Image (cartoon, rainbow, N blue to C red):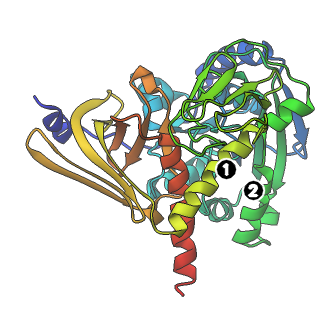
Amino acid sequence: MTGYERLARAKRFDMKRKPFRQLHILRPVTWVISYPNVWARNLKVNRVGMETIKPPFLLLCTHHAFIDFMVTTAAIFPHRANYVVAIDGFIAREWLLRLVGGICKRKFTNDLQLIRQIKEVLLKNGDVLALYPEARYTHVGTTAPLPDSLGKMAKLAKVPVVMLNMHGNYLNSPAWNLRKRQVNLTADYSLLFTSEELATVSVEEINGKIRAAFEYDEYRYQRENGIKISHPWRAEGLHKPLYQCAHCKSEYTISSSGATITCSACSKVWQMDELGRLSAIVPASDEKVLSTEFSHIPDWYEFQRTQIKEEIEAGTYHLEVEARVEALPNARGYIPLGIAKLTHSMEGFTLEGSFDGNSFSLVKPALSMYSCHIEWEYKKKGDCIDLSTLDDTYYIYPLTHECSVTKIALATEELYLYHKRSALDPS
């Protein structure tokens, strides 16, 4: 049976199944898994306004690394929760994740079924609903875009809204290099709104307060707390989020090794120190003065965003690459489909190909996605993006080094904002 035939016949993940209340017998299991990991990193939870708050409540969490779920479990102890989890988290363990309260979601899709399940958890079961609305691990230790629907969801739920802003999780294992560091963890666990307050404020006010509560900068946190990371490989993989040279502006020419990153186009080299700061240690081939464009890694990342924004404002942004495609219709595993053409342009995404003689097309307009999910060296298969419908998720691996999935993610965010502004002001 071909990959396309397997996909056509595959039973889709049952998104309509009601969420399980976390079984009492499994709650100690979640504690046994979580507590040794957070104790080993001296987790400190700062509780603000939580003295009288008990379930049900909506818990909004920042998203840095896999250990986030363990920190969340420790923070809400002894209460149980249901967690919204991406479909790839269910692979080969769907039954277990459902029993411990997992609710499946395909990333960056408008899934009304999820709203029904959230209401089931909060209003019928009276439990905690833990949501990671950034929907991806942070790229460089700063806040990812949040959906406008958060405020509306909070108002409809009519239960307290609680924030869990975690620190140290990204520094312990950034998405571009998952090798573990030994970094102490903290978490700010605070009440944002009581149910009575939600009834008196607008959706816009709710979103504003949520966005303010979600602000974080892990590299600033590292410096302010004197957290030294001395591993000699601490910068390896940093070229994944920093794909464009800050000096000569060439793209896809940055590489990393040990504690340094290098541009092959202009030969400039930067070193990451133990506090996460960058400094130029080898000047570029066309300059004599040794200057550091961005010592703060998030500033370099945002510089790349400004470059993309200029392309979009000029109407010239366009990417077209061949890519290897795999599908994930359910939790049984990936189905290889073949090679297709991925186009990312001013209009959004198009994925077109012919799999085993069958025409395939997936279109995702720019306004349908406020962000997109990417992975670096995903399961050792390479860098990829994933695009989802309500029934399928497609993992797309560009087949050229003249492409960065980080740029695609940044462009997705900026295209959404560009079209949103245009819709509000057509002139």
The answer to whether 141 is drawn above or below residue 333 in the figure is below
Q: CA distance from mark 1 to mark 2?
A: 25 Å
Circle 2 crowding by C-alpha within 10 Å: few under 14, some 14–19, many from 20: many
x and y percentages locating residue 248 in the rendered image: 61, 43
Label 1: which secondary element: helix
Judge left or right: residue 361 versus residue 172: left
Name the spot of residue 253 as percent of width and height, x first.
Answer: 52, 34
User: Toward the viewer: 212 or 318?
Assistant: 318
- The residue positioned 83% from the left and 49% from the top of the image is 191
Q: Is residue 342 left or right of residue 249?
A: left
Please state the horizontal and vertical placement of residue 255, each as a whole percent of the image. Answer: 56, 27
Identify residue type, mark 2.
Ile
Residue farthest to the bottom? 427
Q: Position of residue 342 (x, y in %)?
A: 32, 48
Q: How many other residues sit within 10 Å of disc 1, few (<14), some (14-19) or many (≥20)?
A: some
**Residue 321: quadrant of the picture:** top left
| Residue at screen point 63% across, 65% down | 152
Q: Nearer the viewer, residue 141 or 232?
A: 232
Quarter of the image where the N terminus is located: top left
Q: Which residue is mark 1?
A: 303
Measured along the vertical axis of the image, is residue 361 above or below residue 21? below
Let me know if residue 61 appears in the view.
Answer: no
**Which disc, if any, is residue 357?**
none
| Residue of label 2 | 210
Three-letter code, disc 1: Phe
Closer to the camera, 413 or 266? 266
Q: Is residue 157 left or right of residue 164?
A: left
User: In the rendered view of the protein, which quadrant contains the C terminus?
Assistant: bottom right
Residue shown at 17% from the left, 41% from the top: 8
